[in-house]
Image (cartoon, coloured by chain):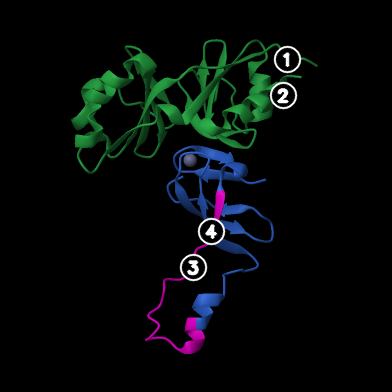
Amino acid sequence: MLLIPCPFCGPRNESEFAHGGPVRARRPDPDAVSDAAWVEYLTVTPNPQGPVQEHWWHVRGCGTWLTLWRDTTSHDIVKGPDDA
Amino acid sequence: MRYDVTCKQAGLSALFDLKGPQADLWGWAGDHLPPMPARPNSLTRRGGRSLYHIGPRHLLLRTGIAEEEALERALGPAAAPPQISIVRISDTLTFFAVTGRDADQVMAIACPLDLHPAVFGADAVSHTEAFGLKAMVLRCEGGFECAVEQSHGDMMQDYLNRALT
Ligand SMILES: [Zn+2]
């Protein structure tokens, strides 16, 4: 179980949060990138072995959306939200 | 084992959901509000009204149900400036009072929050979960109050009954 640092509430149990998926690259202009790069953006979700930046929503708490870095090998939060 | 706890469903409170920048909320409705709570997830009280700071730019104003109509007229939600929102939500929450010597034990079953008085003091209020349901928890005389969405009231009562036996 993760203890997730919320900027408003402080550290809270993972069960109070909803996972919002990894932080994705900015949407490229489909006319300015190759077909391969566009397909990559549309279909490939970041799934590194190591730290991944993720969105979490404190849905059963204060309602804040936050981003943090979680290591997919250890499940540790290696960097919390900047303002937590 | 049996817990020394009483669980009672409370009657309706008058509740107003307030959202927006603090300066704008106070500019519009400050005369009718207790002072702004100093910290996140804390509350203030004045003249029978209490004000819960439950999220960024998000407050809950609570008072007796008898005051609901007069307070709504005073708050004037329909005419409020666009950067703030005032919504009467009295019917949306069901409050339970969990009181008695073992109230903290029952709340520890329900809820993942650290409710030790050193962490969750007399003026604390927070949304969290209770038996997996989204819930708002605060202290009251002799224990805790726990509010869940109105449609979850019967389920909450059932969970509490099971936790007590
Ligand atoms: Zn929070």
**Who is closer to the viewer here, B36 or B134?**
B134
Task: Tell me if residue A31 is in the magenta stretch.
Answer: yes
> Pointer 4 indicates a residue of which chain?
A
How far separated are the C-alphas under marks 4 and 2?
36 Å
> Pointer 1 indicates a residue of which chain?
B
Residue at 49%, 68% in the rendered image: A24
Chain A painted colour: blue
Q: Earlier in the sequence, mark 3 or mark 4?
A: 3
Q: Give the range drawn in magenta.
A: A18-38
For label 1, the SS is loop
For mark 1, does the 10 Å Cα neighbourhood hold few (<14), some (14 to 19), or many (20 or more) residues?
A: some
Q: Position of residue A29 (x, y in %)?
A: 37, 80
Residue at 68%, 20% in the rendered image: B105
How far separated are the C-alphas under marks 1 and 2?
9 Å
For mark 2, does the 10 Å Cα neighbourhood hold few (<14), some (14 to 19), or many (20 or more) residues?
A: some
The label on residue B3 is 1
The label on residue A54 is 4
Pointers 1 and 3 within a single chain: no
- Name the residue type under label 3: Arg
Question: Which residue is tagged 2?
Answer: B163
* Circle 1/circle 2 CB separation < 8 Å: yes
User: Which of the 4 quarters of the picture holds residue B85?
Assistant: top left
Residue at 68%, 14% in the rendered image: B102
For label 3, the SS is loop
Question: Which residue is tagged 3?
Answer: A24
- Name the residue type under label 2: Ala
